[in-house]
Image (cartoon, grey):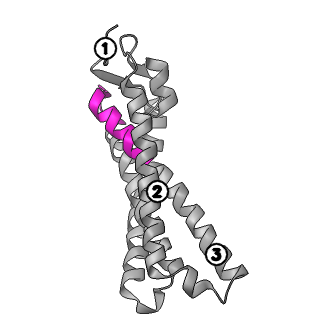
Amino acid sequence: MESGNSTVVTEFIHLGLTQSQDAQIMVFVLVSIFYLIILPGNFLIILTIKSDPGLAAPLYFFLGNLAFLDASYSFIVAPRMLVDFFSEKKVISYSYCITQLFFLHFLGVGEMFLLVVMAFDRYIAICRPLHYATVMSPRICYVLLLALWLGGFAHSIVQVALILNLPFCGPNQLDNFFYDVPQVIKLA
C-alpha cells in the first residue's frame, strides 16, 4: 500500500461571492471600508492598553490580545479577497490554500480559547473577588495565554495533517472566497 499524498491538483480556482460585476464592486467597497476600520481600531486598542499604565489589569491584557488576534485574523482572508474581486483568474496554489487553512484555524481557535479565558477572568473577578489577585496573577495570565496559543496550534496542525492526506485529483473549483476544511474536503 502506497503512503503519502497523491496530490495531482497544484492549484485551486475560487469563484468568489458573486459573478455580477456590480455586486462585486459593492462588496469590494463594503469589505474595504470594514477592513480599513477594523485594522486601525484594533491597533488603537492595543496602543491604548500598552501606553496607559492604569490598564494593567488582566482584563485589559486579554483585551489587547483579543485585538491582536482580531487584526491578525483579518489579514488572512480580506486582502486576498479584495485583490481577487478585480482579477480575471482567481487562482490560489495548493500550498497557499493549506497555509490559509492553517492560520484560519490557528487564529480562530486561539480567539475562541481567549474568549473562554476572558470569561474565566470575569468569573473569578465576580465570584471570587478576594482571590482575584492571587488567581489571576501576571504569571497565570501568561500561562493561560500560552495555553490558548498552543491549543490553537495543536488544533491547526491536526486539521492540516488530515487535509494533507487527502487525494486531490478531481475538480479544483471552489464556490467561495476562502478555504476551510469542509470546502477543501469537497474538492478531494
Q: Which residue is mark 3?
A: 122
Q: Which residue is mark 1?
A: 6
Q: Please name the amino acid that badge 3 sits on.
A: Arg
Q: Secondary structure at mark 2?
A: helix
SS class of the residue under badge 1? loop
**Residue 81 position within the rendered picture, expressed as x and y whole percent measured from the top left:** 38, 40
**Residue depicted at x 50% and y 50%:** 109
The answer to whether residue 70 is seen in the rendering is no
Of the two numbered discs 2 and 1 in the rendering, the one whose residue sits closer to the viewer: 1
Position of residue 88 measured from the top left corner of the image (x, y, whole percent): 30, 27
Residue segment shown in magenta: 84-106
Give the Cα distance between marks 2 and 3.
Answer: 29 Å
125 sits to left or right of 21? right
Discs 2/3, front: 3
Assess whether residue 5 is covered by the magenta stretch: no
Q: Position of residue 94 (x, y in %)?
A: 30, 27
Tag of residue 34: 2
